[in-house]
Image (tube, rainbow, N blue to C red):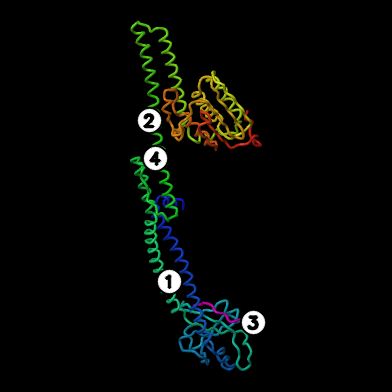
Amino acid sequence: MKRFGRRLRSLPIRSRLALLVAAAVAFAVAAVSVVCWFVVQQKLYDQVDSQIDAVKFNVSSNELSAVLDACPQDVPEIRGDLRPNTYYMQIVRADGTACSFPSSAGVLRVTGTDRTIAENPASAEPTFHNAKDTDGNDVRVRTTSIINTTTRQVVPGVALEVGISLTETRNTLNDLALILLAASGVGVLGAGAAGLAVARAGLRPVDKLTEAVEHVARTEDLTVRIPVDGESDDEVARLSRSFNSMTTALASSRDLQQQLIADAGHELRTPLTSLRTNIELLTRSEETGRPLPEADRKALLASVKAQMTELAALIGDLQELSRSEGQRGERVQVVSFEDTVESALRRARLRGPELTITADLHPWYVRAEPAALERAIVNILDNAVKFSPEGGTVEVMLGSGVLTVRDHGPGIPAEEIPHVFDRFWRSPSARALPGSGLGLSIVARTVHEAGGEITLAPAEGGGTVATVRLPGAPTPPPGAPDPA
């Protein structure tokens, strides 16, 4: 059975469907055929039983005595509605001996049922059953007690058997069995052919889907689309729509990846070119034995250090963007938003010691990745520090899950606001400043993953206001670990 199951699973789907349809039809046809055969058999037996019941006997005591006395040598004729050699008719004694009438079609073999009725004729009911004659032919028999027409009493110790040959009935049933068998075979073959045709028609969309998948695997062409009937909502249509959605997402992801690589290469080229130039100047001065002036040398080393810092920041941003959602989701936990902002403020004050950074913070707890959330807040504060004038003020407020960071810098032109969260996008006025253009993109993604939203807008009186809204509560949820 296991070997058959393995062989069945190794067949193509359409062949399995055809076999399953054929097997189901074969089972149904076999069940119907068997039921039909037994119903017809019972109907034919009922007709034979009705013919036997139509036989009427008028047996007097003298005639019965003559039959019993003469049996088995010379049995006289008994009056009855009988056709010679059509019916079997004989009398059975309790000891199992039988006496056939001259008009009987043959001699019946006595069964236990016949002897039981002969032993107790007064209490026995007439019984129909199948029997055989001495030649082995099948006979339908009714065994009943005998009533004396003179005394109207049941004759003790004897029973009467009347039967009809089942040869014609058996022939009819055999012919019916052959017809049903032939019809079943034709039905099974037709069902197999129909199942194969239905399987081919039903799996045609799957074949198209398979061809599309093979084409994508072979050519990496993600523009392939499977045509789907707009009104269809079956499993194949849903699978085709899912495949189209998947290829669209993959194409978009690949485009974003290629764009990221191109932008990263462009952004890396500037610091690397500057580093190479500065290092070549330092190397050439050493090789020629003409050292650079101390001031120029310090300036070159400071430039190298700044470029290295910018390059390290860019690589860190790229690593952050390359992390998958699953890797980020594993580190999500309950975080004190207030503590995260405090930590980010400490780092921001070190980067802008000449600025005044004020803070008004209130408790708030959110579900986020601690390191990513702090990095996002640091990026927002870095932008505020970077664009604030010397001696300016940065105002930070946190209340009810809303964080606002306001600077007093030049602000962002209205036409540039829709692009501030794009990867590697930098305002034309800020391209001379250090940065990779990835900071706000990382901020937006981190905030969205935490279920919040971020906006940038011009502030009244000049400057920019960054607003971060995160869902949470002023107290940690029960059972949550201590954020500290």
Q: Residues within 10 Å of mark 2 (few under 14, many from 20)?
A: few
| Foreground label between 1 and 3 | 1
Q: What secondary structure is found at the residue carrying circle 2?
A: helix
Residue at mark 2 to residue at mark 4: CA–CA distance: 16 Å
Q: Residue at x 42, y 43 (%)?
A: 246
Specify the label residue 262 is tagged with: 2
Q: Residues within 10 Å of mark 4 (few under 14, many from 20)?
A: some
For the residue marked with disc 3, what is the amino acid?
Answer: Ser
State which tag comes first along the sequence, 3 or 2: 3
Q: Residue 370's spot in the image, x, y percent? A: 56, 30
| Foreground label between 3 and 2 | 2
| Foreground label between 2 and 4 | 2
* Residue highlighted by disc 4: 251
* Residue highlighted by disc 1: 177
Q: Is residue 144 left or right of residue 436?
A: right
* Residue highlighted by disc 3: 123
For the residue marked with disc 2, what is the amino acid?
Answer: Ala
State which tag comes first along the sequence, 4 or 1: 1
In the depicted structure, whether residue 151 falls above or below residue 218: below
Q: Quadrant of the C terminus?
A: top right
Residue 436 location, quadrant:
top left
Q: Nearer the viewer, residue 305 or 399?
A: 399
Q: What secondary structure is found at the residue carrying circle 4?
A: helix
Q: Residue 304's spot in the image, x, y percent? A: 42, 16
State yes or no: discs 1 and 2 in contact (Cβ < 8 Å).
no
Q: Which residues are magenta?
A: 121-132
Q: Does the magenta-highlighted stretch encompass residue 408?
A: no
For the residue marked with disc 4, what is the amino acid?
Answer: Ala
State which tag comes first along the sequence, 2 or 4: 4
- In the image, farthest residue toward the front: 461
Residue at mark 4 to residue at mark 1: CA–CA distance: 64 Å
Residue at mark 1 to residue at mark 2: CA–CA distance: 79 Å
